[in-house]
Amino acid sequence: MNTTFSITPLGDNAVIIEWEQQIAPHIHEQVMKAFHCLQSLKLSFITDLIPAYASLAVLYDAAAIRQKINRPARAWISDFIKRSLQQVTDTGTTVSRSLQIPVCYHPSLAPDLSVLAQQKGMSEAALITLHTAQTYTVYMIGFLPGFPYMGKVDARLASPRLKQPRTAIPAGSVGIAGEQTGIYPLSSPGGWNIIGQTPIRLFDPSAQDPCYCRPGDQVQFVPITLETFYQMQQPS
Amino acid sequence: MSIRVLQPGLLDTVQDAGRSGYQHLGINPGGVMDRVAMQVANSLVGNPPGEAVIEMHFPAAAFLFEAHAMIALSGADMGAMINDQPVPINKPLLVSGQTVLRFTKPVGGACSYLAIRHGLSLQPWLNSYSTHLKAAAGGFNGRALQKNDVVPFCITNSYTTVLGKQELMILPWTAGVADLYGPPGQLHITEGSGFALLNDHARQLLTGAAFEIGPQSDRMGFRLRGPSLKMAEYREQISAGVTRGTIQLLPNGHLIILMADHQTTGGYPRVAHVITADQPALSQLRPRDEIRFLMIPAETAEELLWQQEQRLHFMQNACKLRLEEWLSHYGLH
């Protein structure tokens, strides 16, 4: 893997690997390669990995490392990460899943659709076409369990968060914030512009894999009618 | 074999050492606010240090023990009573069935822990007993304890031969906790990536000024009151992973320290991190308590954590020896 990353402390039991700070697929690909590399090692002293747009946080059990190697953990883990990432090739492609997520853009489920279309000087149909035209990368899961941060949306759709966040947004709501699009996995307060809703459950604590999306997934939205939405909606 | 909630508290949840390995899915680790108190309470009753406990904030619940149990309380002193007798924290207690545990006044600290020998009998979620309130999963039905909840515990001893007709027995040893916490109100921090973005004055304020725990502080984070810190130029970062203890600078110049239920990622500048060894003491602070930050190198932070871990091991071993001796004296196990 090319060496254009830095490793700096994130407190005393984590380090953060950072690549060039921009939101771009080729940067994120490096993040995901590093994530899969370290995850595949299944090391007990690495307690968590948090991949994001252009960084990977590596949380470690400093006491366990110290116990084992009898010297400071931080310097050791940084060396360990550098050595491990050297094994990762630049050319190999990571296998990412492709997901098609049905979304109903009916106004009853999309409180910000018509306002956003007006602001952007386009019809609601044109807005929906733009939103469904491209494949998005899940850059990061954060904010809530299973909340996918996807990008980038067409520049014509980019829109700041609501000035006054809503106190409750239903689970499955699809929103736009800046150049990102995302889906609320749980009912939650939030400030994204809501343009639709998916009947898919993005988070189900009783499932073997509680989260529907994973970092690195390639997502395409498929428009569905209100009738299909209610047919597909699973009882929660 | 259970405890019944007679009256609910402000926020009483089942917690353990936390849920690791799922942060890439946005599932935060949660777990106890004060890991030292959890370990002390568990060690006193002979449990593994990270066994599930009940974390309580004042006003805390009133519990009815439906069977004999060996328990311990640690962390905040909330004026605990068994029936009408005051009971100390940091000592093992034997309580008989049909006794009531309640908490009468906030004497000191913010969160108290109840450990029961052999642990609670619950289903783990993603390898942890910690209650994830947002996900409504883990712990006891994924939520805070409510009136008439019956929390089952595992039991192997009846303690009848020891207790006789007594409803309470305070075992004659105490876990020393003084050297397990740092000095109150003095928090060691290490530099975060956002520190370099602060202007000179703000850097001086961070370690020179006093801050206060704000009223809007909870298990997710402690909002601080104090001087507003300015950046040479405020800019949010591209969102990245954050950790417990991360001190974020909000756009209004105020600070927030991420606690147990923090989100996994964030875009606010990370100006510093409260060292792991000082997080238990921080957890025990309440709104309006004053804190000051002392900047130390990352190497020293790890050294302090290592020393704390050694002391915790020492405490665990000491508790184990006393308890084993006591149990064998009564022919229990």
Image (spheres, coloured by chain):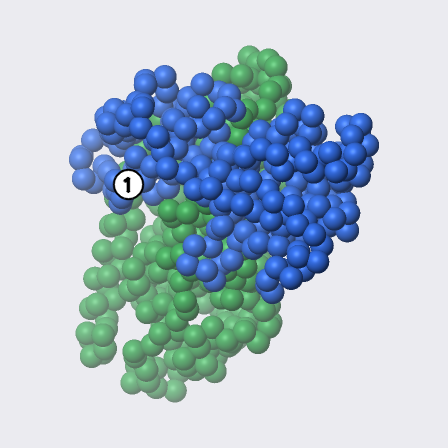
Report the chain shown in blue. Answer: A
Please name whichever residue, B196 or B89, is drawn nearer the observer in this view of the structure: B196
Looking at the rendered structure, the kind of residue marked 1 is Ser
Please name whichever residue, A180 or B13, is drawn nearer the observer in this view of the structure: A180
The quarter in which the N terminus of chain B is drawn is: bottom left
Residue B142 coordinates in the image, percent (x, y): 52, 62
The quarter in which the C terminus of chain B is drawn is: bottom left
Quadrant in the rendering for residue B124: bottom left
- Say whether residue B45 is visible: yes
Seen in the picture, residue A16 relative to A172 is either above or below; the reply is above
Q: Is residue A20 left or right of residue A234?
A: left
The structure residue drawn at horizontal position 49% and vertical position 16%, both measured from the top left corner, is: B196
The structure residue drawn at horizontal position 57% and vertical position 21%, both measured from the top left corner, is: B205
Q: In this view, does B323 lie to the left or right of A32?
A: left
Seen in the picture, residue A130 relative to B24 is either above or below; the reply is above
Residue B22 coordinates in the image, percent (x, y): 41, 47
The structure residue drawn at horizontal position 49% and vertical position 38%, both measured from the top left corner, is: A218
Task: Tell me the chain of label 1.
Answer: A
The structure residue drawn at horizontal position 75% and vertical position 38%, both measured from the top left corner, is: A125
Residue A149 coordinates in the image, percent (x, y): 55, 37
Q: Is residue B246 left or right of residue B217?
A: left
Residue B125 coordinates in the image, percent (x, y): 42, 60
Seen in the picture, residue A56 relative to B60 is either above or below; the reply is above
Report the chain shown in green. Answer: B
Seen in the picture, residue B116 relative to A43 is either above or below; the reply is below
Please name whichever residue, A20 or A200, is drawn nearer the observer in this view of the structure: A200
Residue denoted by label 1: A40
